[in-house]
Amino acid sequence: MVTLTRLSRPSVKFIDDYCHNYRQLFDEVRNYEAFKLLHLGLLSELPRKSLPQIARAVGLSNSQSLHHFLQNSTYSTSALTATRLKLILQLIGEQEIILCSDETGDVKKGKATDYVSKQYIGNLGKTARGIVSVNAYAVVGQITYPLLFKIFKPKGCLLPGDTYKTKPQLAVEILQELTEIGFQISLVLADSLYGESGDVIGTLQQLGLHFIVAIRSNHGVWLAPGQRVRYNGWKPYQQQLSHRQSESRCIREIIFGKRQRLRYYQITKGDTPAPTGDNSWYIITNIEGNIQLKVAQLYSLRNWIEYGFKQVKNELGWADYRLTNYPSIERWWSLVFSAYLLVSIHANNFSERESARDTTKKITPTSQLIAQFQQHCWWDKAQTWKSALNNLRLIIQPYIFACLLAPWLEVFQRRYLSRELWKLVHYLNQFPTLLNDRVVTDLVAA
């Protein structure tokens, strides 16, 4: 383990406690401090997470140290990712995950940024100049955890030493890496780009994983002579949607010749079937049994995971970097995934504490303290990722306000106000870190 030459300056305690899991990755204390401050900035309410804005919010005179961290620090991004995945594994224990594989793209102007090309940007639903990555997320209960991302390198943008890989090939690499690491995957969800890939389907079957993936409406299936396509009857059902009213849908199975190991379904919106148009889509699965309604509910998870990640992108500044070389962009994205995990951990623990409150009357000092925090008029008592982020932002507010007001308090010599602000920061730092102490201890020791 690397020994730091001095102790890092504290920021907000729950962020410092989380970042302590990564301390051994940094051989310079200034880089470790930048790592912590960037987490603080990413979690903040800044509408755009640019380095100059983050620097002001966390009390730095300029953004030079943050920029140096992203561009020139020597820590290993892969080691950071490995530590984060190890933390997730220890947090979820023996629980299986539902894995969602998807891609995300962002418009980027100019020609200086690595791997920016005219390509399909899913967020826009059209072709534009941008940068695209293939991402994987885990669902455990009602909480999502960020797993891996891989940059897509278009053929016309390859740098020396690069090897061209399609998006499905990148998804296959992610699947293989996650299973080798030790994640127990109960189900894989993906869109038609991966559902139409023989490499992806073959890998899923080779790994023995259950999957539900989308396919195109013109998906081809070989039929033996004399066989025909049979459409079973439509079955209506109510699709439960996150934070929205349930939606009426219909589903039917499509059988090509005889029912095989792979089963095909068509889903359509509305009370009555609408087998054509944008309101109808097709999926393929290897789940067995009487699954017609179950498969529709399970596949719908992909939609709210995708919607949830769009929220994360907007809230945590996935595309707010002003960097041009990919190693720096990769560091930025790794930090966003790390901040994402920090919120997921607290969202999970908030949910567990709320559930425990329904079954026990036992009052502890920790529960009393949390109850006091919840008296804030803006405290969000919902049990979602976004509500956890809102609450964490309330806790870091005094620290950021103290940093933003510090220059004015020096100009007008209002040091007493500064002292009171930092007293409030000190009090809010009593907020209990919602990490499992055993997990943290084991991870740091490893």
Image (cartoon, rainbow, N blue to C red):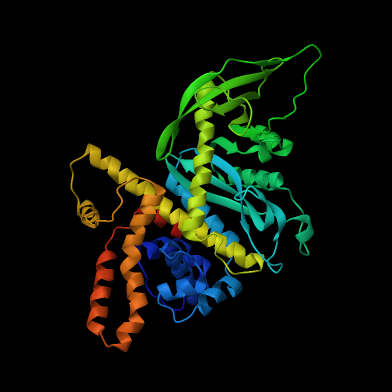
The relative height of residue 33 versus residue 121 in the rendered view (above or below) is: below
| Residue closer to the observer: 300 or 33 | 300
The relative height of residue 407 versus residue 194 in the rendered view (above or below) is: below
Name the residue located 55 percent from the left edge and 57 percent from the top edge.
Answer: 81
Indicate left or right for 229 with 331 as reference: right
Residue 328, image quadrant: bottom right
Answer whether residue 124 is visible to the viewer in this image: yes
Name the residue located 34 percent from the left edge and 44 percent from the top edge.
Answer: 351
The relative height of residue 232 versus residue 101 in the rendered view (above or below) is: above
Residue most extreme to the right: 225
Q: What is the x, y in percent for residue 213?
A: 62, 34
Indicate left or right for 70 with 114 as reference: left
Q: What is the x, y in percent for residue 271?
A: 49, 23
How many badges with numbers are in the image?
Answer: 0
Name the residue located 66 percent from the left edge and 68 percent from the top edge.
Answer: 325
Answer whether residue 209 is visible to the viewer in this image: no
Residue 375, image quadrant: bottom left
Q: What is the x, y in percent for residue 346?
A: 37, 52
Residue most extreme to the top: 226
Q: What is the x, y in percent for residue 358?
A: 24, 38
The relative height of residue 212 versus residue 225 in the rendered view (above or below) is: below
Residue 228, image quadrant: top right
